[in-house]
Amino acid sequence: MRRCIRTIGPTDTMAAAKSPKGLKFLVDFGPLAVFFIAYKMDGLMTATLALIVATLLALAIGFWATRRLAVMPLVTAIVVTIFGGLTLWLDNDIFIKMKPTIVQGLFAVILFGGLVLKRPTLQFVMGEALKLSDAGWRQLTLRFALFFTAMAILNEIVWRNVPEGTWINFKVFGILGLTMLFSLAQMPLMKRHMIETPSEPG
């Protein structure tokens, strides 16, 4: 029986061929854009509410389009809802500012846990899009675990020591930019450990 729900990673969130073009980009980055625009228009509390709504909507659209729930977006949506809700309920912006710390920290714990159990988590998250050797998956998982740990620490340093507007720019542009640069920097490792897929006979 075909399963209607599979947990996969952000690389494959919108991998289904029937997904409308550009929908993956909208699901991945739409909530962040909504948060930034709402902040510029009416401050952090309005932006927090907008982020919760946009994140849940993006998750629902992603599931509707692919019949799949991606692991990392799902974890992010849960944390956004909890910490965003606490921010609004208690009227305290500390919770939403800690949200990136919690998300990045959870990703690090999940990846480190997979390594301890000798089941590199990234292989299950990205295995449909990337074919690497076992050693390659272990190294890539370790690198991302360390990166997420560093990003969690960096967010704590930033939000505690800079003005709110500067932290907003870091959250929207800094975290995204650093993640993209780090991912690109892993290309040599992935090329070294890439497993060639046999071509089908013509």
Image (tube, rainbow, N blue to C red):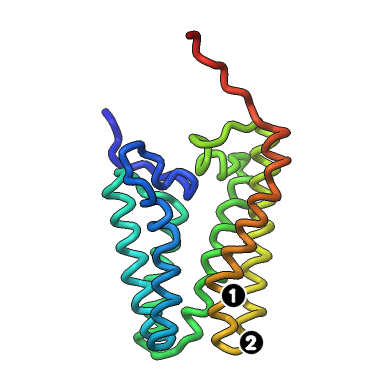
Q: Is residue 9 left or right of residue 110?
A: left
Q: Secondary structure at mark 1?
A: helix
Q: Is residue 199 left or right of residue 8?
A: right
- Snapshot quadrant of residue 86: bottom left
Front residue (pair 197, 6): 197
- For mark 2, what is the residue? 162
* Residue 125, percent from left and from top: 50, 43
Front residue (pair 173, 89): 173
* Residue 150, percent from left and from top: 68, 65
User: Residue 90 shows which numbered tag?
Assistant: none
The answer to which of marks 2 and 1 sits earlier in the sequence is: 2
- Snapshot quadrant of residue 2: top left
Q: Is residue 135 left or right of residue 175?
A: right
Question: Is 18 drawn above or below residue 100 in the view shown?
Answer: above
Question: Is 139 drawn above or below residue 78 in the view shown?
Answer: above
- For mark 1, what is the residue? 170
Question: Is 150 drawn above or below residue 201 in the view shown?
Answer: below
* Number of marks in picture: 2
Q: Which residue is found at the position 33% from the left and 52% from the top?
A: 62
* Residue 45, percent from left and from top: 39, 86
Q: Quadrant of the N terminus?
A: top left
Say what amino acid the circle numbered 1 marks: Phe
- Snapshot quadrant of residue 169: bottom right
**Do the numbered discs 2 and 1 sit on residues whose CB atoms are within 8 Å?**
yes
* Residue 3, percent from left and from top: 30, 35
Q: Which residue is found at the position 63% from the left and 32% from the top?
A: 132
Bin the neighbour count of mark 2 within 10 Å (Cα to Cα): few under 14, some 14-19, many 20 and up.
few
Q: Which residue is found at the position 29% from the left and 56% from the top?
A: 60
Q: Which residue is found at the position 42% from the left and 75% from the top?
A: 35
Q: Residue furthest top?
A: 202
Cα–Cα gap, marks 2 and 1 = 10 Å
Say what amino acid the circle numbered 2 marks: Val
